[in-house]
Image (cartoon, helix red, strand yellow):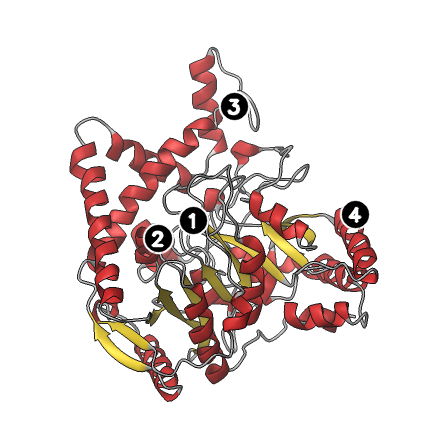
Amino acid sequence: MTELTKLTIAEARDMLTARELTSAELTDAYLAAIDSANASFNAYVTVTHDKARDMAKASDARLAKGEGGALEGIPLGIKDLFATEGVHTQACSHVLDGFKPRYESTVTANLWADGAVMLGKLNMDEFAMGSSNETSYYGAVINPWRAKGSNADLVPGGSSGGSAAAVSAWLCAAATATDTGGSIRQPAAFTGTVGIKPTYGRCSRWGIAAFASSLDQAGPITRDVRDAAIMLKSMASVDDKDTTSVDRAVPDYEAAIGQSIKGMRVGIPKEYRVDGMPPEIEALWQKGIAWLKDAGAEIVDISLPHTKYALPAYYIVAPAEASSNLARYDGVRYGLRVPGKDITDQYEKTRAAGFGREVQRRIMIGTYVLSAGYYDAYYLQAQKVRTLIKKDFEDVFAAGVDVILTPATPSAAFGVADQDMAADPVKMYLNDIFTVTVNMAGLPGIAVPAGLDGNGLPLGLQLIGRPFDEETLFRSGAVIEKAAGRFEPQKWW
């Protein structure tokens, strides 16, 4: 039965529709895989065995009547940032201890409406703040990939590390994730999976614990590009409860896969050749350029001059919004409560005990840049830089470029509890160097596995598109995927 867990969504969908397989069988195969392997990865923080079996049974009944939805009977993992009614939803933070919402996030409601099955909630960096999935209250997630000849544990990337690890280790058919500065694309690159951050406003943010409201966007992590297209079609929608969601039709993304990219203009930004970039990343990038060229694309050198300011501006804007959003966690209405001698003392004690070090660091940074005397010097300046970054992309697209190709990450996955990273938070923040510009400009970006480094670890390439032109990303991403081949970890667990 375990081979069932290696089916892509597209393959499983076809078998389920043809009644060659039942959702109950597929769900049981995944639950068995989780029960035997989750201890090795710490990918799930809660597994919903009974709920999954009930949902699978209902799916089988609908499939028998020929009434199956787009994801009917497909078992998914859900990042712990998404509210799931009556089920553990804590953003992997102690401050939300015991919280089980009485409502469902719009994205997960869309998935259930299309027939998907919930296997459980996935580990993540606390409140999505991290690039390695080591800030979770529930402990670090372990990457299913290992370097050749090594037993050392590696990080899966963050903040959607549980989502990426679970998909890579065949513990769910696909997973929901969120991306504020690279939290879908970086873990996808580290685990040999596909991750797309759609255009800001493509998916509703309602019912997703907020980190930075003007940057956060939900998207899927999947085994291949086709599955990402299938997932995004179901996840995306307009939503009256989220005024930033956009009211425009959701295309059939899957139809874009396999279409020719002949004549497509692919931009190569010179600013992404950063100092100290490993030769392997540059070589991978050149390989990607060659693949797209061979498929008929025209390669164009472009400039995005304000790229160098993106990371510092991001680490002002994101913590400022986090400081505001996380003020609501005070121990009064839900979650952790640490009693104090008065209400102020209770707030202080609850927040000190409830938030981890990285979250506290970002709240402090955010509160500082929003404070009187510093707001103009930092926050306002960062917002001006953001406008310039957005204009860089607009100018390039206006000049006729269809898609931009860059590396996804500056390196392959690094070790858990890496001392260099632990000692210097800025080194950890540099993991987002190729991804944050996309969030700052509200654009769609996809990470596609493109090769292995010298240690046999996966590396990804990133494609950046025009607003609401995810179809071009799927088209060009499928070309890279076909040329690079598929990658999977050697099973050690």
Q: CA distance from mark 2 to mark 4?
A: 39 Å
The residue indicated by pointer 3 is 331
The residue indicated by pointer 1 is 201
Disc on res. 442: 2
Which is more N-terminal, label 4 or label 2?
4
Which is more N-terminal, label 1 or label 3?
1
Nearer mark to the viewer, of 4 and 3 = 4
Question: 158 or 375, which is in the foreground?
Answer: 375
Q: CA distance from mark 4 to mark 1?
A: 34 Å
Disc 2 to disc 1: CB gap under 8 Å: yes
In the rendered image, the vertical position of residue 368 relative to residue 492, given as above or below = above
Q: CA distance from mark 3 to mark 1?
A: 31 Å
Which is more N-terminal, label 1 or label 4?
4
Residue 174: give x, y in percent of width and height.
60, 61
* Residue 413, picture quadrant: bottom left
Nearer mark to the viewer, of 2 and 4 = 2
Mark 4 is surrounded, within 10 Å at the Cα level, by few (under 14), some (14 to 19) or many (20 or more) other residues, namely few
Q: CA distance from mark 4 to mark 3?
A: 31 Å
Amino acid type, callout 2: Gly
The residue indicated by pointer 4 is 50
Question: 68 or 280, which is in the foreground?
Answer: 68
